Amino acid sequence: MITSSVIALALLATSPSPLSGTGLSRTAKPYTPEEIQELGELEDRVREFEQKSQEYRDSTKQLIERKYQDKRALLSQSYDDVIVQLERDQRIRRDDAIARFEVFIKQYPNHLRYTPDAMFRLAELYFE
């Protein structure tokens, strides 16, 4: 089950990168070599974080898709089982109806009203 904290993390992970921001504007004096080195290290950490968060998004997406497919397969299998049983019942009933129509036609081969209808229905059952 997806909780609100998972959704919040996913939204946070999809926010724009801090590296694409304008940064602090310093007009008074340029950065010192130590500050430049620290900024480089910070950029490396941010890139690493972006990479890890992308991996997290990918793995979360794969997990959600797998859970969805598993649930869908389970549901499909349960429907397939019901369909197989219904088709089996249908075959049994069709065979029973064929036998009853054949008996009727043998007993009443010349009945003007019902025999033609029984023969038509029997032909339909044979066709199925």
Image (tube, grey):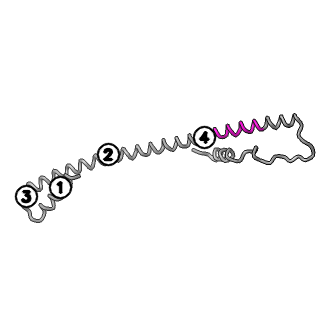
Assess whether mark 2 and mark 4 are in contact (beta carbons under 8 angstroms): no
Residue at (83, 35) in percent of width and height: 38
Distance between the alpha carbons at the discs numbered 4 and 2: 40 Å
Eye-nearest disc, 1 or 2: 1
Assess whether mark 1 and mark 3 are in contact (beta carbons under 8 angstroms): no
Distance between the alpha carbons at the discs numbered 1 and 2: 25 Å
Eye-nearest disc, 4 or 1: 4
Kind of residue at disc 1: Ala
Q: Quadrant of residue 84?
A: top left
Residue at (73, 45) in percent of width and height: 17
First of labels 1, 2 by sequence position: 2
Distance between the alpha carbons at the discs numbered 3 and 1: 15 Å
Q: Which mark is residue 58?
A: 4
Kind of residue at disc 3: Pro
First of labels 3, 1 by sequence position: 3
Eye-nearest disc, 4 or 3: 4
Above or below, 27 against 120 in this view is above
Assess whether mark 2 and mark 1 are in contact (beta carbons under 8 angstroms): no
Is disc 4 surrounded by few (<14), some (14 to 19) or many (20+) residues within 10 Å?
few
Q: Nearer the viewer, residue 65 or 87?
A: 65
Residue 40 screen position, x and y as percent: 80, 36
Q: Which mark is residue 123?
A: 1
Q: Quadrant of residue 107?
A: bottom left
First of labels 4, 3 by sequence position: 4
In the image, farthest residue toward the bottom: 113
Question: Magenta region: which residues?
Answer: 43-55
- What residue is shown with label 3? 109
